[in-house]
Amino acid sequence: MGPLTGLRVIEIEGLGPAPFCGMMLADMGAEVISITRKSSSKARPAEVSERGKKSIAVNLKSAEGVEIVLKLCATADALIEGFRPGVAERLGIGPEDCMARNPKLVYGRMTGWGQTGPLSQAAGHDINYISLSGALHSIGRAGEKPVPPLNLVGDFGGGGMFLAFGLMCAIFESSRSGQGQVVDVSMVEGSAALMHMMYAWMASDRWRDERGVNLLDGASYFYDSYETADGKYVSIGSLEPQFFQILLEKAELDASEFSSQSDESKWPELKAKLSAVMKNKTRDEWCAIMEGSDVCFAPILSMSEAPEHPHNKFRQSYLHTDGILQAAPTPKFSRTAPSVPASPPASGSNTSAVLSGLGYSSEQIVQLAEQGVLP
């Protein structure tokens, strides 16, 4: 079930954004076949990015192993790989090799720097890619060093999600033109795209190229996090004047003191005053006063607390599979709701079934295993 039922995607197993993209597609019903280099009988319940996929183990350094990948490409709508530029070509599974077997194939390439450019062959990680896009510079408090936003902005937001978007764009186009193409996804460019509003505001003098002094980066007192009496935290985002007025009422703030919301010169002083007010009550007490109102308020929940919040429970935003807590597939669909994702398979556990579907006999599969083609 799911809106992508009938779509077949080949994923060359990797780390971070590429398998996250594959998981997104599998969550929506696509058949995602992950090609790993090692087989194992051990289940992988904690490897959430592998949920809902099939797994086959193939030796990509053997001619027969490469042939298996190319045969799979002939049956697929898309392929995902996250190698450094040129590695797939050297293995014999680059775009030209794969698209020779299937001209409609969409070939998704996931890298940090992109397929071309002076840095394309350099190693890197999320923190480096968002450094080059201006994103990391912009996150943190004034006068302090940048704060890494986990690896959400590069790997997952600027990488895996843009790869999923790019693949579906190219698959849509291919359904009309009958031609495949390469989708070159760079986490630098993806994270830059996520910064589009800040770049637009900077161009119109509404944003300074300085950390911690702007409307949405923690400088304003009406858009920030606050500690409560019990050492926990809440978030307030009362940007619009009508929501700001409700904040004044709910927090019992002196309207004459807090009369000029947009006067940036008063932000530090008013933030200190609001901080003192917020520390007078516990997080739960503030929730009782503000949650569900138009203050634009929420308690700041830990990862263990979030699944237990009544709103998240009502929405079924999290699920447990094999005793592992994880976020549920999203978004939600009114007609083609995706099924609960299957547990991550053991590495290579679907090899025989997938190869049988390609026309390999039982004897051939045994022979390939004996030759080391199937690790």
Image (cartoon, helix red, strand yellow):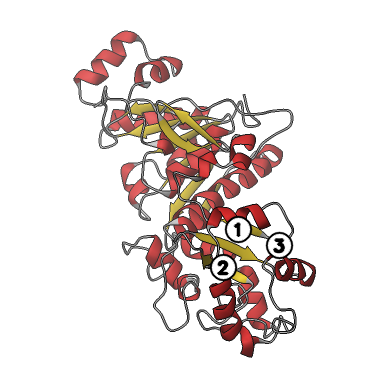
* Residue shown at 61% from the left, 54% from the top: 287
Front-lying residue, 347 or 204: 204
* Crowd tier of the residue under label 3, counting other residues whose Cα lies within 10 Å: few below 14, some 14–19, many 20 or above: many
Identify the disc placed on residue 205: none
- Residue 99 visible in image: no
* Crowd tier of the residue under label 2, counting other residues whose Cα lies within 10 Å: few below 14, some 14–19, many 20 or above: some
167 to the left or right of 62: right
x and y percentages locating residue 46 in the rendered image:
36, 35
x and y percentages locating residue 279 in the rendered image:
52, 68
Q: Contact, CB < 8 Å: mark 1 with mark 2?
A: yes
x and y percentages locating residue 373 in the rendered image:
25, 26
* Residue shown at 42% from the left, 58% from the top: 150
Q: Earlier in the sequence, mark 1 or mark 2?
A: 2
Q: Contact, CB < 8 Å: mark 2 with mark 3?
A: no
* Residue shown at 44% from the left, 44% from the top: 304
| Residue marked by disc 3 | 295
Identify the disc placed on residue 278: 2
Q: Which of marks 3 and 1 is nearer the N terminus?
A: 1
| Residue marked by disc 1 | 286
147 to the left or right of 75: left
